[in-house]
Image: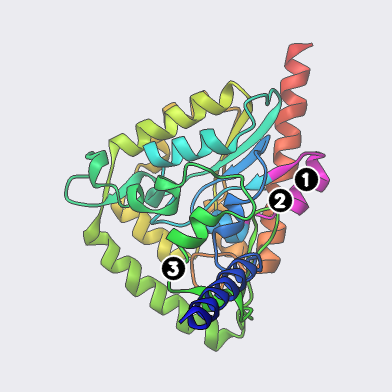
């Protein structure tokens, strides 16, 4: 009996050690969000949904701006503007930041809600996501995330994805075939999904109000810039039907910011992997364009002060 108990305890100990060792393997291949909750508090942030997460490349922008931008964007179900995202951003930002650069991407989906009660914050889907529930966003390894949000998906700790990789700076790199047949197939699938969204997602004044609150908060720590990323023309048509006066709606947000760059007038100049997310090459181009535009805004602001 004694030997049996020793064997059991030894087995449990080895199993525990093995599980802990496995959790320590978590990296950018593990999933689309984990590393964002393991990196230190940041001084400059890129915010938005998956369009920003996949499209905007901090490394490229930092080379131009001589900054330390970090991409803290997630996806449409986790990081639309609202109370959960505001709290998460507050946790991620270094409170001592004074001259940060903050790029907030804006579109219809970031200020809309999949609910018949779009201004009821208790019904917001992100409340029960990692963005809404994670209180510690800068711990490595982050066992809370690994046990609560990776549960049942631990195969990602063993098998590396050949399609997606989350970089240390928050850029979510997605590598898919970009031949016309593959792109057209994914684009049609995306459009069908977003056509369904037309009846599901409603404009939320409360989300827009929280966009203003996030701008107010970040403005205490640096300059806030708003960017509307380009998209395929078919998706643009959907957004225009849902909110034809988008730029009019966000006028207060623009007024509170240090500048607004609307790239949707150049939709046809870029390529997309699925109609909504920029290809890696176009993401590089857009990142460079935004960074150079911010440099110009900074120069103009400095000139006015003189």
> Residue 167's spot in the image, x, y percent?
69, 60
Q: What is the spatial separation of the Cα atoms under label 1 and label 2, in whole angstroms?
A: 6 Å
**Quadrant in the picture for residue 81:** top left
> Residue 194's spot in the image, x, y percent?
34, 66
Closer to the camera, 84 or 143? 143
Q: What is the number of the mark on residue 151?
A: 3
| Screen quadrant of the C terminus | top right
> Residue 68's spot in the image, x, y percent?
75, 41
Image point (40%, 46%), residue name: 132
Q: Are marks 1 and 2 in contact (CB under 8 Å)?
A: yes
Left or right: residue 128 compared with residue 183? left
Image point (24%, 42%), residue name: 122
| Screen quadrant of the N terminus | bottom left
Q: What is the number of the mark on residue 62?
A: 1
Q: Which residues are magenta?
A: 56-69
Query: Relative to 237, does residue 179 appear above or below in the rendering?
Result: below
Q: Residues within 10 Å of mark 2 (few under 14, many from 20)?
A: many
Q: Is residue 217 visible?
A: yes
**Quadrant in the picture for residue 200:** bottom left
Q: Indicate which label's residue lies in the foreground, 3 or 1.
A: 3
Left or right: residue 140 compared with residue 208? right
Q: What is the number of the mark on residue 58?
A: 2
Answer with mark 3 or mark 1, whichever residue precedes in sequence: 1
């Amino acid at each position: 009996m004694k030997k049996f108990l020793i064997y059991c305890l030894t087995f449990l100990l080895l199993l525990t050690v093995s599980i802990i060792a496995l959790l320590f393997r978590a990296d950018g291949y593990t999933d689309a969000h984990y590393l964002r909750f393991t990196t230190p508090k940041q001084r400059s942030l890129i915010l938005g949904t998956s369009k920003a997460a996949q499209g905007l490349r901090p490394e490229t922008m930092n080379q131009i701006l001589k900054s330390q931008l970090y991409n803290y964007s997630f996806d449409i179900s986790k990081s639309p503007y609202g109370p959960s995202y505001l709290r998460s951003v507050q946790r991620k930002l270094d409170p001592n930041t004074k001259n940060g650069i903050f790029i907030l991407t804006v579109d219809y989906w970031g200020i809309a809600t999949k609910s018949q009660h779009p201004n009821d914050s208790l019904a917001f889907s992100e409340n029960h996501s990692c963005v809404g529930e994670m209180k510690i966003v800068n711990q490595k390894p982050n066992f809370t995330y690994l046990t609560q949000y990776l549960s049942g998906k631990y195969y990602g700790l063993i098998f590396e994805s050949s399609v997606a990789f989350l970089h240390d700076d928050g850029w979510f790199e997605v590598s898919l075939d970009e031949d016309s047949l593959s792109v057209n197939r994914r684009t049609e699938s995306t459009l069908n999904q977003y056509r369904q969204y037309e009846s599901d997602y409603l404009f939320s004044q409360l989300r827009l109000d929280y966009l203003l609150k996030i701008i107010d908060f970040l403005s205490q720590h640096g300059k806030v810039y708003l960017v509307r990323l380009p998209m395929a023309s078919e998706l643009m048509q959907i957004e225009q039907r849902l909110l034809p006066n988008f730029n009019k709606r966000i006028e207060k947000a623009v007024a509170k910011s240090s500048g607004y760059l609307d790239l949707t007038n150049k939709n046809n100049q870029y390529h997309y992997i699925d109609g909504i997310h920029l290809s890696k090459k176009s993401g590089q181009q857009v990142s460079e364009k935004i960074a150079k535009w911010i440099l110009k805004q900074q120069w103009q602001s400095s000139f006015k002060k003189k």
